């Protein structure tokens, strides 16, 4: 087992491989280095014949607050600005290609979500096979309010068209309990019980032989592929790049420059917070 990572830790519990994002002070941002390490850990798990199921979880108050920038986590070309739309599209396609590696992992993958699971954090979670969340987790894609569209757009396959539109038209977030009510997550638990609940589910999955798990996952994933998953991701990447050039997105970028990201987000979300939010 490969266990030398900078942004996450890896451990085995029987046939369960548990990967833990470990940047709690920064809310576990999905930096280029972190994404590369998640995918490398995924490759390691797939190659290890002892592993039958994988868990992805995090330390601290957030599963992941989304894509992020930390200087030591970047290499030349990572998250570089793309003034031409084709460069932007290519960058978004690269993001989708990376998460597709997780989606195509031979063994089942469970996302264990606590705290904030926002923006890119949902890209990670929705490319897992199952999501179990804390009752009070906060799940959603607020960047649609000012920045574009989800670059991988797995929402449709988990929620169907109406709930996907409901969330992407508003950028509203769901609690874990609300997410379970509409089928986005398979189970919830109090945050303090989440480790035990998810590990017990993973152990239950691991009672099935690896070959049978691989075969059943392959069939279901092929069904999603026949619905056009890969083509939709290409279309999402194009529209995300277009969205980045919308007047609202350009204005929001200016406000970030003036106020800083945190203050600009608070200003943007204030109008939404002032309105009633009819959800389950």
Image (cartoon, rainbow, N blue to C red):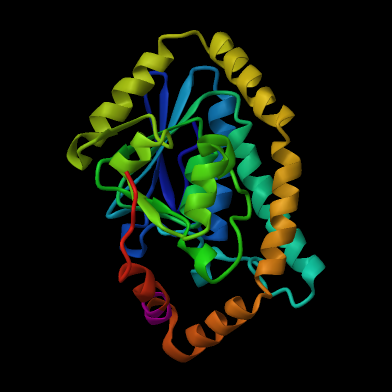
Q: Which residues are magenta?
A: 263-267
On the question of residue 64 being in view, the answer is no
Residue 238 percent coordinates (x, y): 75, 59
Q: Nearer the viewer, residue 85 or 158?
A: 158
Q: Position of residue 65 (x, y in %)?
A: 41, 59
Q: Please report the residue visible at 29 percent of the width from the left and 34 percent of the height from the top.
A: 188
Q: Is residue 230 a member of the stretch shown in magenta?
A: no
Q: Nearer the viewer, residue 103 or 268?
A: 268
The residue shown at (81%, 66%) is 86
* Left-right relation of 11 to 36: left
Q: Is residue 186 left or right of residue 78?
A: left
Asked whether 264 falls inside the magenta stretch, the response is: yes
* Identity of the residue drawn at 33% across and 67% down: 275
When the figure is inspected, residue 102 is found, relative to residue 58, above or below; the finding is above
On the image, the x and y values in percent for residue 224 come to 65, 29
Q: Magenta span: helix, strand or loop, mainly? A: helix
């Amino acid at each position: 087992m490969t266990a030398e990572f900078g942004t996450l830790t890896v451990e085995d519990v029987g046939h369960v491989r548990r990967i833990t994002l470990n940047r709690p002070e920064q809310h576990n941002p999905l930096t280029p280095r972190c994404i590369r390490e998640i995918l490398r850990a995924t490759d390691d798990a797939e190659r290890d014949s002892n592993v039958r199921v994988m868990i992805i979880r995090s330390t601290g108050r957030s599963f992941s607050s989304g894509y992020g920038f930390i200087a030591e986590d970047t290499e030349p070309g990572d998250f570089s600005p793309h003034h031409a739309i084709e460069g932007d599209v290519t960058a978004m396609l690269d993001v989708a290609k990376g998460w597709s590696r997780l989606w195509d992992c031979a063994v089942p993958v469970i996302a264990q979500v606590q705290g904030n699971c926002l923006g890119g954090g949902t890209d990670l979670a929705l490319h897992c096979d199952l999501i179990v969340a804390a009752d009070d987790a906060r799940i959603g894609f607020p960047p649609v309010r000012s920045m574009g569209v989800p670059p991988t757009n797995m929402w449709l396959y988990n929620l169907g068209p109406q709930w996907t539109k409901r969330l992407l038209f508003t950028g509203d977030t769901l609690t874990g309990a609300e997410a379970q009510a509409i089928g986005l997550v398979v189970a919830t638990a109090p945050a303090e019980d989440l480790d035990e609940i998810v590990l017990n589910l993973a152990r239950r999955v691991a009672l099935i032989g690896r070959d049978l798990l691989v075969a059943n996952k392959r069939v279901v994933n092929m069904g999603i592929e026949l619905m056009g998953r890969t083509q939709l991701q290409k279309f999402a990447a194009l529209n995300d790049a277009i969205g980045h050039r919308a007047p609202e997105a350009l204005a929001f970028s200016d406000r970030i420059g003036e106020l800083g990201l945190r203050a600009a987000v608070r200003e943007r979300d204030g109008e939404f917070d002032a309105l009633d939010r009819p959800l389950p």
